[in-house]
Amino acid sequence: MDMKMSDTGFTALMDRFSLTCKSERDMDKLAHIFSYYISDIVEHVLCFGGDILNITGNVLLALWTVEQNQLSDIITLVAKCSLEIQEKFGIYHTREGQDLQLQIGLSAGRISQVIVGDEQRQYLLVIGRNVDDVQLAQRLAQANEIVLSWNCWMLCEQYMFEVEIMKEYEAVKIDVGQPMEYISEFRTVTMVLVSLEFHQTAWMLHLCHLIQEAASYISRVIEKGGGQLSRIFMFEKGCMFLCVFGFPGDKKPDECAHALESSFSIFNFCWENLAETKLVSISITNGPVFCGMVGAVARHEYTVIGPKVSLVARMITAYPGLVSCDEVTYLRSMLPTYNFKKLPEKMMKNISNPGKMYEYLGHKRCIMFGKRHLVRERNENHPLLDREKELETFRMAQQGCLHQKKGQAILYEGGKGYGKSQLLAEINLLAQKEGHRVLPLKLKEADSKQRFYAIQTLMAIFFEIDTCPAYYRQECLHKQLCEMVEEPLHCLFNDLFFVKFPLSFEVSHMDDLTRQKKIKACFFQVLQEALRETQLIFLIDEAQHMDAASWEFLGTLLSSVPIIMVMTLTPTFTLCGEAQHFLQSPHAMLMPISKLAVNSLLRMACWELGVVSIPQELQIYLLHRCFGNPLYCEVLCQDLLSKDILLFHDLQKVEEENSKWETLSANTTKSTMYSIPPASSEEDLELYVCTVKEDVNLDAVLLPPLLKEIAVIQLDQLSPEEQLLVKCAAVIGHSFHIGLLQHLLPGWGKHKLLRVLRALVDIHVFRWCNKSQELPVEPKLMPFSIEIIGKTKAEKKKSGAGSPLELNEELFLPQPEVLEFGVPLLRAAAWELWPKVQQIALHLKCAWFLQPLACRCGSCQRGDFVPFHRFAICPIKSSRGTFRFCSYRDTGSVLTQVTTDKLQLPLPKDSFQLQEKPSRSREAFASEHCRTEEEFLDQVSRKLAQTSPEKDVLTTKPCHCEEILKLVLWPLTQHCLITGENACAFYYLLEAAAASLDLSDNYMAFFYLRKASSLLGQPSAFSFLKKRKVKICQFQEAAFCRLRSEVCFNMGQITLAKKLARQALHLLKKNFPWTWFGVLFQTFLEKYWHPCSMSQPPDNPDEK
């Protein structure tokens, strides 16, 4: 007994998301709408005794296996199940305004189960008339309808249902009113859908053999290009194979090109080798999708969801018998345009704007050779940075070529984006200024498949026939050859340069090998003649794509002709034997290109942004993502400009802004910015500085697609264990502690964690913050001597098991177990792969871990950085009377539920005691009514007096508040901001600002306070209109003003500092004296009160 369900609104919903979503992150909503909806249906089917065969897109196929004598009862049961599903889930309203509605088809009869595939992967198929019937029934069903096949209707208890007979279709319609969370990812993939339509006369057993043969070939070809055969499913006319390039662990460079070439190979194989094939259609799309588990806990499948999944299925119907691809695949493949043919636009069901479509014609040799060009052009206003050593090597090669009369080859080797093309552009400019003749060429991967392509193009550039019209090419070439090559030999170049010289008698009697040798000899002769007039320089970018014949020719040329060759190589590619032989030549030198120095990278960023200085937070953002890679810096700067998250200030006007806190940004950053001298010395030149908008969190800015793909490819080269660890570390931040990392991986023991970490450190994915450190065989934790919460030994034993650092222990010194990312972009890309729900859940888990550690160090008497901060927030309670850290919940995430149940705002009872044995309880201190300021100061003085300096060993220990600020307070603030807990973020921003001021870091204090200002919103000129975005208490408002006042005072903004200080006192209902007499009197009182309170004995001496 079969049941097939389809969701009528899901494709339309995906189309709506594809039109409205601003980023890949918005597709998280789409994935969870489908996942939660389908999981309820799956559980319902299982409750009625069914099983799930597969979930493909928005289609679910269920199966009930029964004996013949029970078939009638089971049909009735399945029909009741279908009615109940339609009643409960038939219409699902989404917030996006698109309803999801079910179509259900039922069929009964015999089916055949076939297993196809190879030893590594096997796929279960169900075939037979019953499968065709259930597909027909489901297709006939409208929204909220159930359709039975005719055979199913004849076998069921018909008296129990009211039906409508559909005679023309022989159908009946019933009238009805790892942890899985760590597996799912958002990533860009390339999907290939292969559709095989067979003749209806094909014998069933023969059809199974054809499907097996096709599956084996498709799987083999797809895997060579880095793809996977994800799913095989039958339809009424044939079989479909869904293949995916770019699954987790499989991401490869040139993914779209591999998908197209594999598809064309499959297309030819199926036509030529599968005899009963009636039609072969293949469609390819590329785009962001959700990759993860859908279904219920008992039955779930790993699948892909997204608008591109629907598009690839619609393209099969729209363009039958072709290898078709969308525009994104066409552009990202970087294949020659002559390999494609634009297809006419066609309407597709539920897809409003499918975009341009192309037919892939396969790799064909173009009738034209390549053209001279380099990827980069020299920018006169931006000099080349940190490449003096490389340029000096080029000059030495020039001198060696002149003196030794031998060729010289320099091969610059560097990773993608290291500036190899920019270096060639610089050499091109220098050589042309010196009057040398330069032949530039940029190669692509496809060029390596054409024999002698590189030399053919270089010589075409030399003869200047690469840009001339085709009708004039032969005449132009004749003028170049007539003085250097004999006339009868001109016809040797007919095939090479697409000309038609008359075939001479001499050449007609040559075999192919002799002709090739003669062509090379003529090239040598021509180049020798040209060298008498000027020096020749070959510039070849991406030389790893050069064909073997061209490498061989250049090797011979290097040893016999004094020519200079400058090439660039990418080390990730394996060179052919001829290329390796070329590198071993004594006249060839391989020179690695180093990364840019920090100052050079920041100078480049200033040039890209058009400013003379950038703020510190932007420097950190670029340095953490670029690691000295100039391409990454350029793309990131362009991305920041396109997203409009920077503010630009005129440098002359900035110097005048000093009256308001809101206009203080550029003033403050001037002393802490990275600055460069202006490019021009003109006096009236406008100079700008840039700052980051207050409400922008740079850590949450998504990577540009180009850089994300580069980083995901690097991530997928790791093992699954290493990938999971990197993804969890990415949630923590650029730097992370091993203890917190293990907290996010509760199923991992210390031995496994250290083993995987050691492997990642060895390949430089991670590195120790202190480079002299080595990974210990077992963790060696150095105690920091701060008790998290003052407890008795009995209390510690009871409550220590479930806390982040096992709160019965001490806080450990961070440095020996703190690592940071050592590969550019990897942290940002790994963080973006998490679906939004899991991402927030992990950030909450990190926040819960760090919350008890957000305090002063032991040397500084513990406590809050803003004195008595947590006591002041007592009145701020949630509706339930508790201090909730976070109210975020999601019914689909167990991790989120568990985490939010444990997180709370800092409470007075969680404060850090100021002594070993308190003289009074914290509750008494917090609840005691202070009638006057004198009584409050007396209480504080007594508390301080009870700590004996002679006995306090903490005062002799070094201060570690700087590490706490870096590894606890600021990361904790980031976790709060990302999860949307702005009240908690404001609390920890004040703590971070106070800590920065204690550490004499005025700029970072200003930075944290500006972040806090953005959370509160823009101030209003009228007090009755003032409405904060975040609810804060009066004490926090006063502390916020006091901290800003101190920052302004340190900046020299005395007037603004006084204004903010008075505002803070006013909020505390303490007015600042307005006269000199008042100041002297107030000072006398405060000096008098303090000694008196210190001399008074405690209220209860027995408690000392």
Image (cartoon, grey):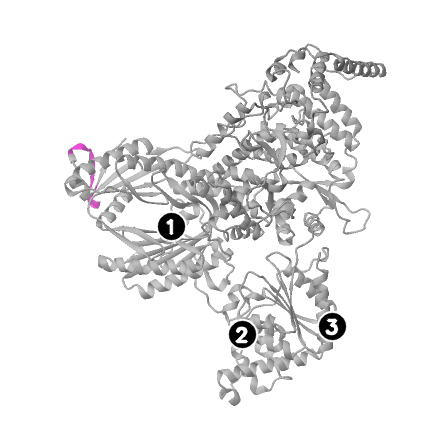
| Above-or-below relation of 484 to 111 | below
Residue found at the very far left of the displayed protein: 69
Residue placed under numbered mark 1 in the picture: 313
Residue at 66% of width from left, 24% of height from top?
Answer: 1020
The residue nearer to you, when weighing 762 against 234, is 762
Tag 3 or tag 2, which sits nearer the N-term?
3
Q: Which residues are magenta?
A: 159-171
- Whether the magenta-drawn stretch holds residue 770 is answered as no
Q: Could you tell me which secondary element the residue under label 1 belongs to? A: helix
The residue nearer to you, when weighing 572 against 282, is 572
Residue at 76% of width from left, 41% of height from top?
Answer: 651
Residue placed under numbered mark 3 in the picture: 399
- Residue type at mark 2 is Ala
> Is residue 341 toward the left or the right of residue 121 in the image?
right
Nearer to us of marks 2 and 1 is 2
| Above-or-below relation of 1058 to 121 | above
Nearer to us of marks 3 and 1 is 3
- Residue type at mark 1 is Ala
> Is residue 675 toward the left or the right of residue 202 in the image?
right
Residue placed under numbered mark 2 in the picture: 549
Q: Locate the N terminus by quadrant.
A: top left
Tag 1 or tag 2, which sits nearer the N-term?
1
On the question of residue 469 being in view, the answer is no
Q: Are marks 3 and 1 in contact (CB under 8 Å)?
A: no
For the residue carrying disc 2, how many other residues have a C-alpha within 10 Å: few (<14), some (14-19), or many (20+)?
Answer: some
Residue 1016 % position (x, y): 63, 27
